Each structure stands twice: as C-alpha cells, then as structure tokens.
Amino acid sequence: MKKELLDNPNKGTSCKGRTISRRDYFIITTVVLGLFIILAVFLTACTPPKKEKGPGVPGVNEVWLIGWVYEPETITVPVGTTVSWNNTTRDYHTVTSDDGLFDSRLGGGQSFNYTFTKPGIFTYQDIATDPPTIGKVVVK
C-alpha cells in the first residue's frame, strides 16, 4: 500500500473498499472547518450584548444608568436615604422626577444624588431616551 502511494500520491487510501483521495480529504476538511466557523459566528451573533459596567454593581441606595436602562428599575429605601444615580455610559441621560422633585442631566460618568425625606412611591424617567426609560423609588 505504501508503495502505491509513493507511485501515485493523489491515489489516497482505501476505506471499506472505497478509495478516498487526498483531494476528497481536503474538501471534507474545508467543509467541516467552514461549518465550525459559521457556527462560531452564529453563536457570537446570538450572544446578548454585554452591559456597560462601572467599577462595581448597583447597591442598596444606588441606581445605575447602564445602556438605556436603570439598574435596578425599582429600588426600596427607608425615609431619609440618599439615592445616587450613576451614568455608567458615555451617553447623555437624565433623571427626571414625574412629580417635579428633581431633574438632573447626567453626562457620561456623572452622578446625581437626592435625599428622600417622606414615604411614598416616586417615579422618574430618562427623557433623553425615546421611549423614556422609567424607574421607581419606593420610600418606606
């Protein structure tokens, strides 16, 4: 068999009575490799985008603007708590209270703080997004 390959290098090898040429090996290898590349591209494209993050995670009295959302969307705090909103993106955002208590424009990396002195449910939105991003602070 080895002598046959040396005499004719394109002849290939025999498998279950069938001759597989080097050209066939090349085609099969190329197709399999191509399928793996297509699968890798598909899996990468289907992976959800990673959220932009700052140095930590939103805390008990912290709300982060991550991408186009408030994180967390609803936060519950006791009366007298100062809540901090942190814009972790490079985009311009706002923290605008629906009842006029506060209205802050935040550039990339900026923060805004507000102290809640009475109990209630306080809704706010980012009017820089369309539709506006909505958030809520529950003060007990």
Image (cartoon, grey):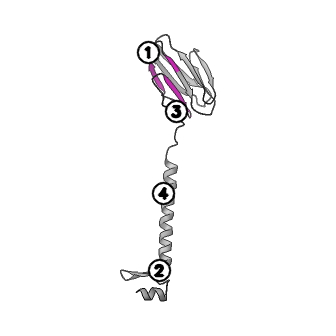
Q: Amino acid at mark 2?
A: Ser
Q: Nearer the viewer, residue 64 or 100?
A: 64
Q: Nearer the viewer, residue 6 or 62?
A: 6
Q: Which residue is mark 3?
A: 55
Mark 2 falls on what kind of element? Answer: loop
User: Tag 2 or tag 4, which sits nearer the N-term?
Assistant: 2
Q: Residues within 10 Å of mark 4 (few under 14, many from 20)?
A: few
Give the Cα separation between the discs numbered 1 and 4.
Answer: 50 Å
Mark sitting on residue 78: 1
Secondary structure, magenta segment, majority class: strand
User: Tag 3 or tag 4, which sits nearer the N-term?
Assistant: 4
Give the Cα separation between the discs numbered 1 and 3.
Answer: 25 Å
Mark 4 falls on what kind of element? Answer: helix
Query: As drawn, is 129 to the left or to the right of 73?
Result: right
User: Looking at the image, do the residues carrying marks 1 and 2 touch, with CB atoms under 8 Å apart?
Assistant: no
Give the Cα separation between the discs numbered 4 and 3.
Answer: 33 Å
Residue 55 location in percent, x, y? Answer: 52, 32
Magenta includes 67? yes
Q: Which residue is mark 4?
A: 39
